């Protein structure tokens, strides 16, 4: 039974994402398949970094971590950890709508709420709601969304900005559900393991890489042209400083397609030749119908074979 | 006397940067020139957002804020504030080597230090030093690097991770100077005001824009080609989510040159036509000899004039 | 009264083109304007080369020569002459449908035709017609389409492949008119003079250049990108050997727009910088509504001016 | 014994090229190999078109025809024939230095030469020599360089501009050898047959295609980018009118590499997808060390395989 590290304690959004990935049969272990999920052993960690370190050390087989949020952007510790050190690979992804449950100690009336425990990232996303509905209350920082519920259960706060999962687990009363200031707040989580064969091509896949460019003018535009010339749809580009010198960056690129799609294979090979370093972060199914190789590509391959055989 | 908002209290790195910008004569007010600094009235604010809001409301003429750090990357609140709302413009920049002073209450022996006040960003940058030199101490969060010194002066902590400026101002003892875990830690600060005529071209300038692209394949590579085809050196590219839908971004581009350099003017005009939205963030001197228009460009302009006159 | 050299004798297609250019008021002399043609003094020459040499020597003010045929492609002597030696410039163009008149000695019956005088280029274009209608006749080479009519008038041949103009001038009988094997045969003629101010921009103009590229990979694609990135429509590209080494070429490019259109001016300046040599062959009206600068370009220029003034 | 059509009669440059191709073992028949030439049966034709028609009809196995001249440029009938009708394929090439032998009737003194027989193309290339050395003589057109020698042997002219081969065959006296006005005059000949497996990759190969582009802006630059992005060296580009409408062209592209080189295979596949029509004209050895796939390409392919296997 594979061990999977995640940001705990139980009840975080990350655990919810992990449960959904498990239920979808996306964990690449024997017996896992859509509809036939394999059981996993969750291992709680107190940070994203610690979860990834557990994979690198072999303590866990996989880690489930957030990688991108529609409001805050990339989750930088996840990106930075993927770009450096022992290589890791992404095997699955899952996007959750993010909204919070405001939970109180049982039988506590709203007017009695003086203190609200909240993970700071969550506090920022429900600021307007709190100002409107609990204007007199004071914020108390918690270590995670689940820990906020724990804090209420332990009597350290009157209310918590938490998840539905945690509110239920700690038997709190639900004051409000689905709370979030900005609509469309979503977080994308990924399942990360050591390098291995990518999940089979589904026709709706994503591929991710990290580029380190040679320090010559036009290097980035040339690299991106390797994708655009092949009609590969770039879905994300993110730059991060190299931490060695200001003005030098690595680039994270996500694009539609699988390493077994011909255009993607060509583009990876070209980027490998062109870049100072290319780190492959994996190809995995996205579940959306967005990535089939254009049919003309297979026709073009057949045409090429006929030319080589002399039978056009 | 222009009022300039910055992250206070007195003694922060931001104040140090502001003082240097003032001393260099980079504040675009009557009488300012290299060697002839104009006096300014600093206005302390408790966040970068608040400093920029003071410019937008007219309370301050300018704001001095950090925009990029060689270790942590872009200062996201600064980027996000520049990209949205009332337009702002950058007029000057200054890069500071970042290292910290560890200061204690007067006459306190190192072995007596139990608590260390630190701004969390600073704490992260001196973690190894503290583990080695003050292994028994406990961290107490402060609101800024200067506030950490204030905390010591007020008796709320034994030592502070602070700046040399603040240590002196609050008459603390210096336990160590130039402390930082990673070498080459530097922060770039910018002077931001309302839109206005850019500072005159110096031949060593930087221009910055924010792009919102049309949602068509290849839009980013086409936009970047507008720079590369004109041999304009891109010094930074940063993507940020639009906050409306996951997978949609705005792009921050910095490049070498001034709006009065012909290639830059051409590129701006082309990007304005090509992009869904182009927000100009300014052209300003960098002080480094990195941005003269290639001489051939002037020659080419003269050649074009002769053709138009029919006297080639 | 300007002297204009052309391939004679009287009655050639080139003379017909010259008369049409004159009638359209396209000759850049005092008083010429659409509807107010200026009179010219035609000077017959026995080759395209000789006509251009007359301009270079000052004997003629302009030359009218064919430059492109829809069946045969570019008229190579015209291209080669434009690319080398004293610079020349194009001021006007005119496209004629090409078809031939088959003319005989007066009162001669079709069955009596034994010999047919024809300029070889013309003979090639009426080969099928002759095979069908005059299968027994033998071809006799003539020096031009008009000279073929002269040959018949002088009794050197029974029939001529000639122009309507020449058939009338030499008082021949018309056996057939509008004869040509392939439909859509058209020839484009240009009016060439010494370098001078281009005709005023009309919004429907063409610009032509000759490029000599540096011998580096990708030089041609980079040069063409200078046009495509500016949405300039390339209407013709032709390569010609440099005559010095096999595998080295000059390129003739025609594109939509005028040197006074901003995108064209930018592109010319960029090509001047990028290429080993750029020879400008002129900007002139085409009479078709195909070349207005996109309106967004003017808007972009105004936007740029506002940025420079600090009044966005 | 394969039959090979060429522009005759015996003694033309084309025959000389065919003999050299045969001697080099470049004819793709059983037993041919460098140093082990297979015998062939030459079939004379009176034009390049007729030689290619003989291949299309099955009368000949191959045709040897000129394709490019360093002074005159492409041999247009050869290009036009390759671009249309039944597909043909190139299997070998050979470049000859072109210079002429001036030959006279035996015992004729130079001062007695009144008439000079010459193929018009050849006459153009020795114009200056004739003006200097035989200023009083008059030109008499011949059907080929070899036919010019025949004309002298038959008493129809006093001297011939011909080849060394023909002069010897018709037992003429050699007045001058190596005659040509411009230095570096060379002609490239190709061996053309029906479609079939290309000759094996040698590492010094050339590939040739004909493109018909979709009528969209930037189509040509996009097509050429498919080569440049893969570092494929374009050695020739030639445009020819489509003969249907003025301003529409097909493009002939020659580039370094073989259909079995990965970058070339990728580029062919991409062009096949991108273009309205792509006609493959073959891959064949050039004999010069100019075409090895960059070593990094094989390394990149191995790297890709390891990623797919999950063993990076």
Image (tube, coloured by chain):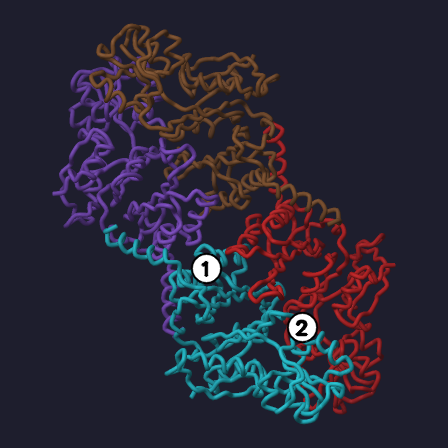
Chain colours: A cyan, B red, C brown, D purple
Q: Secondary structure at mark 2?
A: loop
Residue at (36%, 73%) from the top-left corner? D309
| A118 in relation to B23, above or below | below
Residue at (58%, 68%) from the top-left corner? A242
Q: Which residue is mark 1?
A: A232
Q: Residue furthest bottom?
A: A154
Q: Left or right: where does residue B248 sit relative to residue D158?
A: right
Which one is in front, D164 or C105? C105
Residue D261: name its quadrant. bottom left
Q: Are marks 1 and 2 on the same chain?
A: yes
Q: Which chain letter matches label 1?
A: A
Residue C94: give x, y in percent of width and height. 48, 24
Q: Which chain letter matches label 2?
A: A
Q: Residue furthest left?
A: D1
Residue at (61%, 41%) from the top-left corner? C295
Q: Which residue is mark 2?
A: A181
| D154 in relation to B156, above or below | above
| B22 in relation to C157, above or below | below
Q: Residues within 10 Å of mark 1 (few under 14, many from 20)?
A: many
Q: Left or right: where does residue C298 sit relative to residue B191?
A: left
Which one is in front, D311 or B274? B274
Q: Left or right: where does residue D128 sit relative to residue C201?
A: left
Residue B168: give x, y in percent of width and height. 83, 76
Residue D24: give x, y in percent of width and height. 21, 45
Which one is in front, C286 or D18? C286
Q: CA distance from mark 1 to mark 2?
A: 35 Å
Residue D114: name its quadrant. top left
Q: Secondary structure at mark 1?
A: loop
Tell me, yes or no, whether the two marked residues, 1 and 2, touch with CB atoms within 8 Å: no
Residue at (45%, 59%) from the top-left corner? A232
Looking at marks 1 and 2 on the same chain, the residue that comes earlier in the sequence is marked by 2
Residue A174: name its quadrant. bottom right
């Amino acid at each position: 039974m594979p061990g999977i590290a995640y940001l705990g304690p139980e009840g975080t959004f990350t655990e919810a994402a992990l449960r959904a990935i498990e239920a979808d049969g996306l964990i690449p272990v024997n017996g896992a398949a859509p509809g036939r999920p394999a059981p996993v052993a969750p291992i709680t960690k107190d940070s994203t970094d610690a979860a990834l370190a557990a994979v690198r050390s072999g303590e866990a087989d996989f880690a489930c971590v957030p990688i991108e949020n529609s409001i805050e952007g990339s989750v930088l510790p996840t990106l930075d950890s993927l770009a450096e050190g022992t290589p890791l690979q992404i095997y699955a992804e899952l996007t959750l709508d993010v909204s919070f449950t405001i939970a109180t100690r049982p039988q506590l009336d709203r007017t009695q709420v003086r203190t609200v425990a909240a993970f700071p990232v969550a506090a920022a996303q429900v600021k307007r709601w709190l100002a409107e509905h609990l204007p007199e209350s004071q914020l108390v920082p918690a270590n995670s969304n689940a820990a906020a519920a724990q804090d209420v259960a332990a009597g350290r706060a009157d209310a918590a900005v938490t998840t539905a999962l945690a509110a239920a687990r700690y038997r709190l009363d639900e004051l409000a559900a689905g709370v979030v200031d900005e609509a469309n707040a979503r977080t994308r989580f990924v399942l990360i393991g050591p390098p291995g064969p990518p999940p089979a091509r589904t026709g709706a896949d994503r591929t991710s890489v990290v580029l380190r460019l040679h320090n010559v003018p036009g290097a980035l535009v040339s690299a991106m042209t390797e994708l655009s010339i092949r009609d590969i749809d770039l879905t994300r580009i993110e730059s991060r400083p190299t931490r060695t010198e200001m003005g030098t960056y690595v680039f994270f690129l996500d694009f539609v397609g699988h390493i077994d799609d011909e255009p993607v294979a060509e583009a990876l090979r070209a980027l490998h030749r062109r870049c100072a370093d290319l780190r492959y972060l994996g190809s995995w199914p996205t579940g959306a119908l967005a990535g089939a190789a254009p049919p003309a590509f297979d026709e073009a391959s057949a045409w090429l074979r006929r030319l080589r055989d002399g039978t056009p």
